[in-house]
Amino acid sequence: MIEATPNIILHAADVHKNFGGLRALSDIDLQIEEGKTHAIIGPNGAGKSTLLNVIIGRIPPSSGAVVFDGTVLTGKAPHEINQLGISRVFQTPEIFPDLPVLHNVMAPAFARRDGAFRVNLLRSIDSERQIRQEAEDILDDIGLHGRRGDHAGSLSRGDKRRLELAMCLIQRPRLLLLDEPTAGMSRHDTNTTIELLRKIKSSGMTKVIIEHDMHVVFSLADRISVLAQGRIIASGLPQEIKEDPRVQQAYLGGSVQ
């Protein structure tokens, strides 16, 4: 049995994942400290998104276990893991394109309260005003309040990513997993997102970020782990990672800027 460690909110312990003869993850031992921002970097195909999918229950590990605040996640359904307090922003935004932006943000709040696909209509009517206000406040924070009535499918890719972030934030997760949260954004929007994520950090929310933009990584991360060929080859403070020759060779072709 894997026991919870003080200050460690998530522990992926000896996780392996095989797809047929392909080993996507090997010997993963990842510990995420509560209240911190932990970045995972590495080249394309390193296994980063696979690791997040194992954590949220989208794919089972071949061996090993994932523990969240003392609860073993392995074997649980994605919606059960979500209701324990883990939300994820995906690499490709997962939204409701035919619904207004505001309703996209409100829907996960009902799911958080009532459970997967079980919305109590009477309670929904009674509390709709509160949830609507919370959704509008979050849209204001991320800069989409002016488009709250637009169909989500009409948004740009960058705005869809911000919308998905809002859909996660309204669930008030203890752990937020972000898979390339600024992909497709302009530098201005990227910097706005960085400031929003800093604000979230000040609230105590734990974050795991997969990101290729080193400006984002070094602006936000308290700690960085580096994946290469399905293995963690280095883990440490940002400056340590920046100076690690293994990281420079495996990922950044000589230097981290």
Image (spheres, helix red, strand yellow):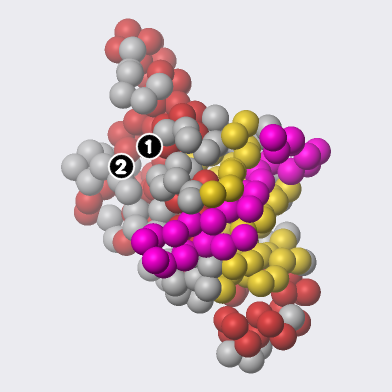
> Which numbered tag is attached to residue 240?
none
Quadrant where the image shows the N terminus: top right
**Name of the residue lying farthest toward the left:** 98
Cα distance between the residues tagged 1 and 2: 7 Å
* Visible residue check, residue 199: no
Q: Main secondary structure of the magenta part?
A: strand
Residues packed near mark 1 inside 10 Å, few (<14), some (14 to 19) or many (20 plus): many
- Residue at position x 39%, y 66% from top? 21
| Occupied quadrant, residue 185 | bottom left
The amino acid type, in three-letter code, at marker 1 is: Val
| Occupied quadrant, residue 238 | bottom right
Residue 216 among magenta residues: no
Q: Secondary structure at mark 2?
A: helix
Looking at the picture, how far across and down is residue 59, in whole percent?
Answer: 41, 47
User: Where are the magenta residues, as a range?
Assistant: 1-27
Report the front residue among 143 and 199: 199
Callout 1 touching callout 2 (CB < 8 Å): yes
> Which numbered tag is attached to residue 105?
1
Residue 23 among magenta residues: yes
